[in-house]
């Protein structure tokens, strides 16, 4: 199986002491390195999504690997191809990373059939990240729709682990139906954290659903905001960005205090395949995280 992996980039001894950093074009020589990784656990989330826990096999590589909330990796299944997936775990977990993967094509279909112990390749991490450091000392809105909770989970866990660095934290999550909710086994845990307000809404309830029914903007209307002391991170389908960000604008939150992820446009991670470009901007190089001001000036970004 190892023979199916592309050749490794040869790392110089002087580089071994440096942390990995793929968010610079000048260092794109590193992106051809493949980390052989074992799937150590698979957690079913819905009929379409599973959470994969992966552990880089080489101990030295595992220790050097690091990422920031909002970045993504390329997952390679030898013989089938590779796909871009946002990292869903906390950057502080050095032993493994977690990837929430929806069954949507050939590669994801193969991954959904794998079992613990299977070996895949990882490249990355790639892309920009949510500026969590800049948000310290402010109120935080963490807003997700549907699969958007997957990339949002990394900043959620990061904020929870550093809870005293932030003021009020609101987590708002919405899906079409209750059976599409992701990570519902963690909601009670998140709600127990001091001053974290988690609200979940669905567009269509069923007989078992006792929560609110409606759109995610309905949850926003019930939150009193201090616009110049608030940052927002929004992940989900592009159509959601327009309505959520428009509401936040009306509440007075500046556009450069709202951050969205365009991770759904990712493809090769290196700006070579030209499938993620928006005009002259490549979202895998300049994104996937953008402030909303930048997004509004990228034609057809959402």
Image (cartoon, grey):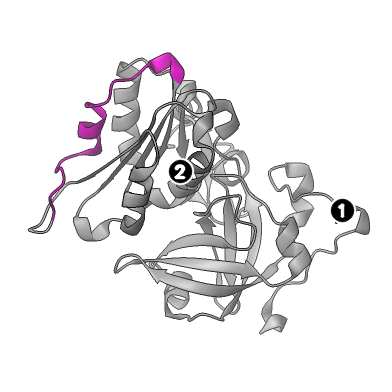
Q: Nearer the viewer, mark 2 or mark 1?
A: 2
| Residue range highlighted in magenta | 209-229
Relative to residue 256, is residue 102 drawn left or right?
left
Foreground residue among 118 and 285: 118
Foreground residue among 61 and 193: 193
Q: Is residue 268 above or below residue 104?
A: above
Hey, which residue is sitting farthest left in the picture? 207
The residue that mark 1 highlights is: 15
Q: Quadrant of residue 221?
A: top left
Q: Is residue 77 above or below residue 96?
A: below
Q: What residue is rendered at 33% in x and 23% in y?
A: 248
Is residue 8 located in the magenta-colored stretch of the structure? no
Q: Is residue 186 above or below residue 196?
A: below
- Crowding near pointer 1: few (<14 within 10 Å), some, many (20+)? few
Mark 2 near mark 1, Cβ–Cβ under 8 Å? no
The residue that mark 2 highlights is: 156
Foreground residue among 246 and 221: 221
Q: Is residue 211 above or below residue 8?
A: above
Q: What residue is rendered at 31% in x and 17% in y?
A: 251
Q: Position of residue 285 (x, y in %)?
A: 63, 43
- Tell me the quarter of the image containing the C terminus: top left
């Amino acid at each position: 199986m190892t023979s199916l992996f592309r050749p490794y980039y040869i790392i110089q001894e002087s580089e071994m002491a440096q942390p990995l950093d793929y968010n610079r074009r000048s260092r794109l020589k590193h992106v051809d390195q493949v980390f052989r990784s074992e799937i150590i656990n698979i957690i079913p989330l819905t009929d379409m999504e599973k959470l994969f826990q992966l552990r880089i096999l080489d101990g030295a590589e595992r220790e050097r690997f690091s990422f920031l909330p909002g970045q993504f990796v390329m997952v390679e299944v030898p013989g089938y191809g590779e796909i871009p997936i946002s990292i869903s775990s906390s950057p502080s977990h050095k032993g493994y990373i977690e990837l929430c993967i929806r069954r949507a094509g050939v590669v994801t279909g193969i991954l959904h059939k794998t079992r613990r112990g299977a070996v895949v390749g990882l490249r990355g991490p790639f892309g920009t990240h949510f500026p969590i450091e800049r948000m310290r000392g402010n109120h935080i809105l963490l807003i997700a729709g549907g699969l958007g909770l997957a990339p949002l989970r990394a900043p959620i866990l990061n904020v929870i682990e550093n809870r005293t660095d932030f003021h009020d934290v609101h987590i708002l999550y919405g899906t079409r139906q209750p059976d599409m909710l992701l990570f519902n086994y963690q909601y009670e845990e998140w709600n127990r954290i001091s001053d974290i307000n988690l609200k979940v809404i669905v567009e269509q309830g069923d007989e078992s659903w006792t929560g609110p029914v409606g759109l995610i903007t309905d949850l926003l209307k019930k939150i009193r905001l201090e616009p110049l002391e608030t940052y927002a991170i929004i992940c989900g389908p592009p159509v959601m960005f327009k309505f959520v960000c428009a509401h936040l604008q009306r509440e007075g939150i500046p556009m450069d205090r709202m951050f969205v992820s365009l991770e759904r446009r990712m493809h090769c991670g290196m700006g070579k395949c030209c499938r993620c470009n928006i005009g002259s901007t490549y979202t895998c190089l300049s994104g996937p995280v953008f402030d909303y001001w930048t997004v509004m000036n990228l034609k057809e970004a959402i």
